[in-house]
Image (cartoon, grey):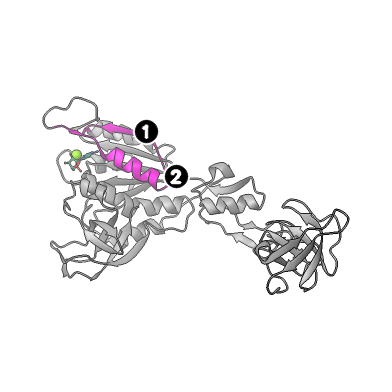
Amino acid sequence: MISIEEALQHVQSQKINTTSEEKDLSSALGYHLAETITAPFDMPDFDNSSMDGYAVCGIYESYTIIGEVAAGNTATNKLEDGKAMRIFTGGKVPDNTTAVVMQEKTSVEKKTSVEKDVLTINGEITAGQNIRAKGGELHLGQEVFTTGHYINAASLGMLASLGKTSIKVFKKPIVRLITTGNELITPGMERKTGQIFESNSHAISGALLQQGYKCTEKQQIEDDFELIKSGIASYLKQTDVLLLSGGISVGDYDYVKAALEENGVEEIYYKVFQKPGKPLYFGRKDDTFVFALPGNPASSLSCFYIHVLPLLQRLSGGKRNGLPQVNLPLAHDYELKGDRPAFLKAHVYNNEVTILDGQMSSMIRSMAVGNALAFIPKPQKLDSGDTVQCLLIS
Ligand code: AMP
Ligand code: MG
């Protein structure tokens, strides 16, 4: 049996091959960049107004208004000393502009069609005010994002504003899932005594989706060595991460480990000193990684978040390593019994963490109403206010 740290280290030290693909911006959300992006021009590309107001030349109390620049247009006449031009947010500031004065700090005296309108300034003018300078955000050639950058919504906006239509991203891993167990039937089927509805595939598929991945294919197999062996054989092909649930413990019908061995999957570790999820298995065959998750619903989902997610993140070219973590004070006293470090179903709210009732590894409801796993590294008595490491699920 190995420690949690050793198990996580095994995932980090695996040699992996990442591949990249070109993606349209419209479908690049949630991927990681497989290239460095540099600015193809200054951002902004021209001095422009940050306000609706007047571009003025020189510092005076009043100016003659000689024209207008709307966003998308350029000035048609020349701005000279003592003159002003109406300008709108985003409009290209005319040459010779000293400052842009916001509309609210001006008044305009309307003249006849022959004479030009006169602008009066109410307040001080500072040279350069309300002008977004060319290159103020980025200079031509400047690094915008490096390889591995996570494409969030703002990244899409940034890339579009640089004129990009597609980017090179790392491919996401292909994940397949096998659930095992004679007692499992599909929700919707008629249930006989002793049978339960298969639920892990739903929880794991949901967790995959929530984290930006998907389950490409799944199948349910009974506790039959030959069937499990051939199921694994067919799913090892063209799969980056094969997940199995159930049948990995020490029961007489737990055939998963032997079936993996028969398929040439090499064990990297089996059994982690943690609660829940002790009988976790990790192995690989060529470039396909295999996690066999314990069947108990809360165990399999916890193991997914703690041990599988960091591998998926590595394979997709990201810099993230597991769920985001925060240290928070405990909202109440708590005693962790037993002998193993524990990931407890918890609820983080208002900057504190509550450990929920229903910690047995078979119980998924507490995980469903919670939003975090609280990590307690060794059995101990904790007081309200003690700091606890929390892994944030949502
Ligand atoms: P196992 O790891 O196969 O010994 O299963 C441990 C417990 O988890 C048993 O009570 C199983 O019935 C339950 N279990 C295993 N697989 C699933 C599944 N896919 N959905 C719901 N419960 C499961
Ligand atoms: Mg079983």
Q: Measuring 22% from the left and 25% from the top, which residue is drawn there?
A: 189
x%, y% of residue 76? 84, 54
Q: Does the Cβ of the disc 2 residue fall within 8 Å of ligand 1?
A: no
Residue 173 is marked as 2
Q: Is residue 78 left or right of residue 325?
A: right
**In the rendered image, the vertical position of residue 164 relative to residue 132, given as above or below:** above
Residue 344 occupies which quadrant of the picture? Answer: bottom left
> Element type at marker 2?
loop
Q: What residue type is labelled 1?
A: Ser
> Element type at marker 1?
helix
| Residue at the extreme right of the image, as rendered | 114
Q: Residues within 10 Å of mark 1 (few under 14, many from 20)?
A: few
Residue 389 occupies which quadrant of the picture? Answer: bottom left
x%, y% of residue 247? 22, 41
> Ligand 1 appears in which quadrant?
top left
Q: Is residue 64 left or right of residue 18?
A: right
Number of numbered tags placed on the structure image: 2
Q: Which of marks 2 and 1 is nearer the N terminus?
A: 2
**Does residue 303 show up magenta in the picture?**
no
Residue 234 is marked as 1
Tag 2–tag 1 contact (CB < 8 Å) = no
Can residue 24 be seen at all in this image of the molecule? no
**In the rendered image, the vertical position of residue 163 relative to residue 177, given as above or below:** below
Closer to the observer: label 2 or label 1? 2
Q: Nearer the viewer, residue 245 or 50?
A: 50
**In the rendered image, the vertical position of residue 133 relative to residue 240, given as above or below:** below
Q: Is residue 123 left or right of residue 9?
A: right
Q: Nearer the viewer, residue 386 or 253?
A: 386
Q: What residue type is labelled 2?
A: Pro
x%, y% of residue 70? 74, 52
Magenta extent? 195-224
